[in-house]
Image: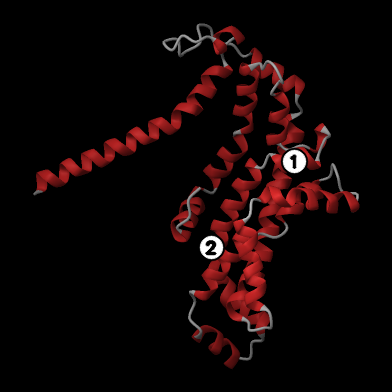
Amino acid sequence: MVKRININKIFIHALLILGSVIMLVPFLWMVLTAFKSISESTQMNPFIIFPTVWRTEAFTSVLSKMNFARLYLNTLILIVGRVVCAVLTATMAGYAFARLNFKGRNLAFSLVLFQMMVPSQIFIIPQYLMVSKMGMLNTSFGLLFPGLVTAFGTFLLRQAFMSLPKDLEEAARLDGCNIGQTFLYVMAPLTKSSMVALGIFTALFAYKDLMWPLVVNTEQNTMPLSAALAKLQGQFTSNYPELMAASLLACIPMIVIYIIFQKQFIEGIATSGGKL
């Protein structure tokens, strides 16, 4: 029996290691290609994996062509702004849908669920027209606009508030708390893990967002990293070492964020049961 359990553990660990290696292959390919020449990066010989000469010309060329300091700043503004707005609005809306009784609550929440069911690309044209009418094209606010509210976050926080016992609210009312005080001092702190999970998801979605930044921003100084990388892709040919070098530099912010908030990442994903 013990031997069988050990065999099962070895088999499971082997599968996990194999899956980890498979997931690391694209990242390793990106790193190796960044140090290759153009001819090496496009050749079809599968046995030539490492560059014959480790070159750094792609990094120097990319740094001279692109203002990475500005791109990092734009991306940071995008991530922080969307995370703050999403967590703030979703927490309040989730509490209202979960705990408050008002006319049209079910209808309003059905509209939130409907927004989750349809592709986000459907809203690009009306959102663009709204930003254009406000004169906010090529601005940081234009990048943040679709993330001011989040249907997914509202649903996630609603479920978190519904899981809390009603006795907490009753005890708060007996102590003289109004609705705002009950929400701020009693209920909201108990959904911290769900807020962290929502912040993680929002940060990743904002970092990977490509279509909206390309639509709303056409100037290089207002683009985030994702849109700037897309501009490096040529119509007919592409300099793959430069593209991979820029992609490697673009990974630095998320790697740093993960290293700093690694504990919160793991706790938030484990608690919410979500998948990235």
Relative to 116, does residue 47 appear above or below in the rendering?
above
Horizontal side of 276 relative to 235 (left or right) equals left
- The answer to whether the residue labelled 1 contacts the one labelled 2, judged by CB atoms less than 8 Å apart, is no
Rendered location of residue 27, percent (x, y) = 50, 28
Q: Nearer the viewer, residue 63 or 85?
A: 85
Q: What's the distance in space between the residues labelled 1 and 2, CA to CA?
A: 27 Å
Q: Is residue 218 visible?
A: yes
The residue singled out by tag 2 in the image is 194
User: Which residue is pictured at 58% across the width and 65% down the height?
Assistant: 155
Residue in the foreground of this view, choosing between 16 and 265: 16
User: At which x and y percent is residue 193?
Assistant: 51, 62
Q: Circle 2 — which element?
A: helix
Q: Nearer the viewer, mark 1 or mark 2?
A: 1
The residue that disc 1 covers is 213
Which element carries disc 1, helix, strand or loop?
helix
Q: Residues within 10 Å of mark 1 (few under 14, many from 20)?
A: many
Residue 68 x %, y %: 72, 30
The amino acid beneath tag 1 is Pro
Colour logic: secondary structure
| Residue sticking out furthest to the left | 1
Q: Which kind of residue does numbered mark 2 sit on?
A: Ser
Instruction: Give the residue at x 72% y 20%.
Output: 235
- Please tell me whether residue 95 is drawn above or below residue 199 in the rendered image: below
Residue positioned 19% across, 43% down in the render: 8
Q: In the rendered view, would you say 251 is above or below 268?
A: above
Which of the marked residues, 1 or 2, is nearer the chain's N terminus? 2
Q: Is residue 184 visible?
A: no
Characterize the local packing of mark 2: few (<14), some (14-19) or many (20 or more) Cα atoms within 10 angstroms.
Answer: many
Q: Which mark is residue 16?
A: none
